[in-house]
Image: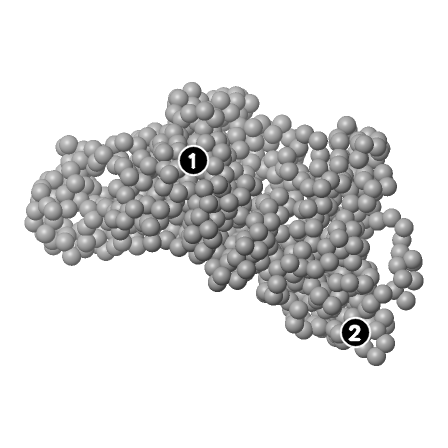
Amino acid sequence: MWSELRALREDVDYGTPPRDGEPVTLMVDGEPVTVAAGSSVMFAAAAAGRSVPKLCATDMLEAFGSCRVCLVEIEGRKGFPAACTTPVEAGMAVCTVSPRLSELRAGVMELYLSDFPSEDIAGGWSELHDVIAATGVASSPYGPGENHLADPIDQSNPYFLFDPAKCIVCSRCVRACEEVQGTFALTIAGRGFDSKVVASQGESFLDSECVSCGACVQACPTQSLVEKSLFEGGYRRADSPQA
Amino acid sequence: MSVTVCVPRDSAALSLGADEVATAIALEAAKRGVAIRLVRTSSRGMFWLEPLVEVQSAAGRVGYGPVDASEVPALFAAGFLQGGAHTSALGPVEAIPWLARQERLTFARAGITDPLSIADYEAHGGLRGLKRALSMAPSDVVEEVFASGLRGRGGAAFPTGIKWRTVAAARAPRKYVAVNADEGDSGTYSDRMIMEGDPFVLLEGMAIAGHATGASHGYIYVRSEYPFAVAALNAALAVLREAGWYGPNIQGSGFSFDAEVRVGAGAYICGEETSMLESIEGRRGVIRYKPPLPAIKGLFGMPTVVNNVVSLASVPVILDKGAQAYADFGLGRSRGTLPIQLAGNVRRAGLVEKAFGVTLRELIEDFGGGTRSGRPVRAVPVGGPLGAYFDASLLDLPLDYEALAEHKGMVGHGGIVVFDDTVDMAEQARYAMEFCAIESCGKCTPCRVGSIRGRELIERIVRGENPQANHAQLLKLCDVMENTSLCALGGMAPYPVISALRYFPGDFGLEQSKEPSCVV
């Protein structure tokens, strides 16, 4: 079933919404590409057919810049700017693939996997799993530590559930609720490692202002928010979807 | 004529009993039928002498300190109102070498004036900078600040003049001045001293910034731990409005400017400029990505000057005395003076304003008098919780933005905390990661998760669990945090950790090595 679902996905996610500025030409991995001014480097890379790994970015939402896996190198600039939050400039030379970028992206992915159910790393189907495959990180090197793996699942909504063990706090659900649906039912509570997605004032999804529109479920890159109908006989962590 | 007696109202002095001393002096004077004029001033910043009582005499201000309230009758008996001898007598305060050796520009009035007396302020050079600025074209004011070489004193050291140019050049219906007074670095208090002790100088600097850049409204974002600063700023704003130096059409110049105080809610991250802007707007204090820079799209989406308290408080003297007079202090690309805050295990802690170029050794040994414990200095973190630790071999480094950066350190906000040889540097490194974990806004993963993993790795190393492998993983983590974090909290939290590993590997149970344990 999961491979069929994969085939149904929209073809290209440009990562950030399209813009309508004047055309700007830049180089991505040595190839010229022309996009509208105001577009992100990530958008330009996608337009050039290059796939930059991403988790918090999707083209139905404005850029956010939190997941730190879309880092690229830009000639003449220090460090590793995030492709999603860096606007294109004429003549810019962007590199999306290098050993150093691979090393850093893998380092970030190791941190994600250090707080993700280990039994769900291999074989799952989600955008997170695409990035796991693209970065070649198979497991966390950190050993046991503080985590959210035992946080309670919210199954209150009849149509979807929220499993915080798989949440990477990318805020896509929160932003979809605001930007796509305009409901503002979701937010992030707490700070640092305690940051978590909550509905309304920390209520269950069903008791919150959520209108069950599904925008958050569509936006979730990890299946932390997922439709209940996909799980025959009910969702249990041990039965997490496998390919 | 009644004698003027000054007792500080700075919160460091208050914590040492300054209010009790002031009350005791007033009561004793009344009891003896002696007329005195009791003035509550700011502090000189010589905290080991607080509460420091100063008496205005023919020979200038003479000091007594530290004074305990119980000693007040004895002081009267000793004739302290006439400068009489007493065990706590210090002589003329400005001749105390610790003070005499400083170059006080930004802190020129510290401990001298009544913080809320505009007459006192003007009598000691206040408002001259704003008067001159208002007589100049805004662009000339920007260039004057640029020529002074002033760089952001909050820690990032970005040239203030360039920031102002950007805001001045931006076209927008409104512009703002946002003051970062969320002073949260360990061992720092210069912002607090300015706000409590000389609030007019900050407000004057803000008005100059407003005139120079076309901003008409200011916000001062003060951490909630500074209630006296909030009160002083609000009172000072009222005084300036009443005197026509704040509000519409300032002194008939056609320039209007006003400001308000916003109080934080206890988050270190709100000292990062974009989080601060989010917080002022009433949202969660999380980092905004850049670009756009706040100078172009800042508070409420408008061009915003975001400056630290000390940066803005240094502007009036630059406008008053001229850019060159300020730039004549310092060296290299570090011009002017820095209010350095000495703290930790040191005999004479306090505020030292010196031209850039003073060495850590001069600060710690000459000003600080060495460690309070009398034991050797072992480690010195400079620039707050994100600054590197220096070991004793680096004490001859001059305080200079570039010189410290060469050693992966930073001047930061000018805080220096001294540790003696009993410090456990593995614990300090662990705490650096823990601090990052506690204060992380939680937006980006390298900081939110990395700080937790960093703390866990250091704990494992110290427990002797696979120390080599965990050390290697820690260095890898530090590399990832430094290069992938969204802001400087996650990006620089590794600095104290790496420096602790480099200079003090033995504290972690790791082998001593002549080579740096890593080069990041």
Q: Which residue is mark 2?
A: A239
Give the number of marks.
2
Please rate how many residues cluster around mark 2, counting C-alpha atoms within 10 Å: few if below 14, some from 14 to 19, many from 20. Answer: few
Give yes or no for contact between labels 1 and 2 (Cβ–Cβ under 8 Å): no
Q: Is residue B39 left or right of residue B267?
A: left
Q: Which residue is mark 1?
A: B313
Colour mode of the rendering: one colour
Residue drawn at point x = 65 percent, y = 56 percent: A111
**Up/down of B78 relative to B395, above or below:** below
SS for tag 2? helix
Query: Could you tell me which chain the residue with mark 2 belongs to?
Result: A
SS for tag 1? helix
Hey, which quadrant is residue A122 in on the image? bottom right
Query: Could you tell me which chain the residue with mark 1 belongs to?
Result: B
Q: Quadrant of the C terminus of chain B?
A: top right
Which of the pair B441/A212 is nearer the observer? B441
Q: Amino acid at mark 2?
A: Asp
